[in-house]
Image: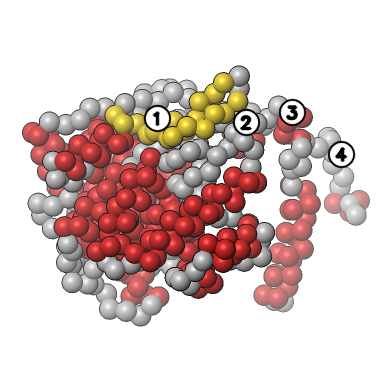
């Protein structure tokens, strides 16, 4: 009779076979002129498509050399700095306006924004018995995986799930944008109840308020929040809503949408991409790294002490032994990430009000010294700066948003961009299918009894 220990031993030996027969020597990529990771040798992205949704500018090129510049991010041609300054000057929240802009390619007027907010409010509810049957009865330890399952389950509640016409995909997109905050909040509450043995608290959404207010209301036992907290979360949602077609999750959305698949499968794919620590999960890694650094150097550190410990992290001697300073550096941005600049200002304001300015100062010094150390290691055409993930976790911590929800908050924001990219992709009937070079000689097939 096979035993569990036998199975574990088999897995260990089989894993060695997998590693031996599937590891590709990185030197083979330039030999075959293959753009590993869809990156050119100078670090720029390989052009694979055209989009009108978003534009990320982090450098300029001269004679195929990448020249660092201050980063810029555009949503449908609007500079992110201008968008944020616009709604903040008018003392308004900006996320719903941003969703409208990404979906329709224009800023809404007052009437259009009101009608769009009403549409989101109408769809900000779940099907009958859905909470009980899908969320409460099937808890999950990771909210991102739970969101994938929940999104895929909504397919069964859609009377027309496979229609990929623009009007149907738009209907589905608005529906999912409205529902995702509920799915995340309820999944978190059920996770607390099932795995942490805490009381189950389920609130209904509030009428007449937007995404940020409702999310804070849904995740807090007392359902209360301040105006500053709402404005901060709303800003974070705006900053993370879109990042061009080349980021991993948006590209994944393009790839699967090009097959003609349904909206629920496409968004579930994007969620799986975003979960990874090299993408949306990076904000949680930053928070874990910061806690480790704070424990090591304290809040009354010196520059020398902090620099020494950061060198240990880079040398794989400390934290997770991977040699990475999470939240520093970016695939596109060089001198600066505009999202990080905006969020850093908000983080400082919030830290002052929350009496956490010493922690903010440690973040700022990790950014300053960490970038200096990283720039010592890389080529001259790859300057380092903090990206949006660096301050996102700290901001969410000050908002009392638990780490379990850091990446789901990113998803609540980025589903706006995913939906815009999907709507763009379904208007192109060409399936994406890149090419791979296959390694290995042709093999001779032997009967089972003749094999060694």
Q: What element carries label 2?
A: loop
Q: Is mark 4 on a helix, strand or loop?
A: loop
Alpha carbon separation for disc pair 3 and 1: 30 Å
* Disc 3: which residue: 32
* Disc 1: which residue: 55
386 left or right of 229?
right
Alpha carbon separation for disc pair 4 and 2: 41 Å
Q: What element carries label 3?
A: loop
Tag 2: Cα neighbours inside 10 Å, few (<14), some, or many (≥20)?
A: few
Name the residue located 62 percent from the left edge and 59 percent from the top edge.
311
Alpha carbon separation for disc pair 4 and 1: 51 Å
* Disc 4: which residue: 444
Which numbered disc, 4 or 2, marks the residue closer to the eye?
A: 2
Alpha carbon separation for disc pair 2 and 3: 16 Å
Alpha carbon separation for disc pair 1 and 2: 20 Å
42 left or right of 107?
right
**Residue closest to the eye, 179 or 91:** 91
Q: Which of marks 1 and 2 is nearer the N terminus?
A: 2
């Amino acid at each position: 009779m096979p035993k569990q220990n036998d199975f574990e031993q088999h897995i260990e030996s089989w894993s060695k076979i997998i590693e031996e027969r599937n590891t590709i020597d990185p030197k083979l990529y330039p030999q075959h002129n293959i753009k590993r990771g869809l990156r050119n040798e100078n670090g720029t992205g390989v052009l694979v498509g055209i989009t009108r949704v978003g534009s990320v500018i982090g450098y300029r090129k001269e004679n195929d050399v990448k020249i660092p510049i201050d980063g810029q991010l555009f949503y449908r041609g609007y500079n992110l700095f201008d968008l944020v300054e616009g709604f903040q000057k008018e003392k308004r929240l900006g996320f719903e306006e941003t969703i409208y802009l990404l979906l329709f390619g224009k800023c809404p007027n007052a009437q259009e924004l009101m009608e769009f907010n009403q549409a989101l409010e109408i769809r900000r509810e779940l099907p009958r018995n859905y909470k009980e049957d899908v969320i409460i009865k099937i808890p999950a330890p990771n909210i991102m995986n739970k969101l994938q399952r929940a999104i895929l389950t909504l397919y069964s509640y859609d009377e027309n799930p496979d229609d990929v016409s623009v009007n149907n995909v738009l209907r589905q997109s608005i529906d999912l944008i409205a529902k995702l905050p509920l799915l995340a909040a309820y999944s978190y509450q059920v996770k607390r109840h099932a795995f942490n043995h805490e009381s189950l608290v389920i609130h209904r959404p509030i009428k007449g308020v937007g995404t940020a207010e409702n999310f804070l209301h849904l995740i807090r036992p007392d359902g209360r929040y301040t105006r500053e907290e709402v404005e901060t979360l709303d800003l974070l949602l705006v900053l993370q809503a879109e990042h061009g077609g080349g980021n991993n999750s948006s590209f994944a959305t393009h790839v699967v949408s090009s097959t003609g698949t349904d909206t629920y499968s496409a968004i579930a794919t994007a969620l799986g991409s975003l979960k990874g620590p090299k993408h949306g999960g990076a904000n949680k890694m930053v928070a874990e790294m910061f806690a480790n650094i704070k424990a090591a150097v304290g809040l009354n550190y010196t520059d020398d002490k902090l620099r020494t410990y950061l060198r240990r992290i880079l040398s794989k001697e400390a934290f997770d032994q991977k040699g990475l300073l999470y939240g520093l550096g970016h695939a596109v941005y060089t001198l600066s990430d505009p999202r990080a600049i905006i969020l850093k200002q908000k983080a400082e304001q919030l830290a002052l009000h929350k009496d956490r300015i010493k922690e903010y100062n440690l973040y700022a010094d990790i950014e300053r010294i960490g970038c200096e150390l990283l720039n010592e290691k890389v080529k001259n055409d790859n300057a380092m700066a903090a990206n949006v993930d660096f301050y996102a976790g700290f901001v969410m911590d000050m908002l009392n948003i638990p780490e379990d929800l850091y990446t789901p908050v990113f998803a609540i924001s980025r589903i706006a961009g995913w939906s815009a990219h999907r709507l763009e992709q379904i208007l192109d009937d060409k399936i994406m299918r890149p090419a791979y070079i296959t390694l290995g000689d042709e093999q001779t097939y032997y009967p089972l009894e003749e094999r060694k």
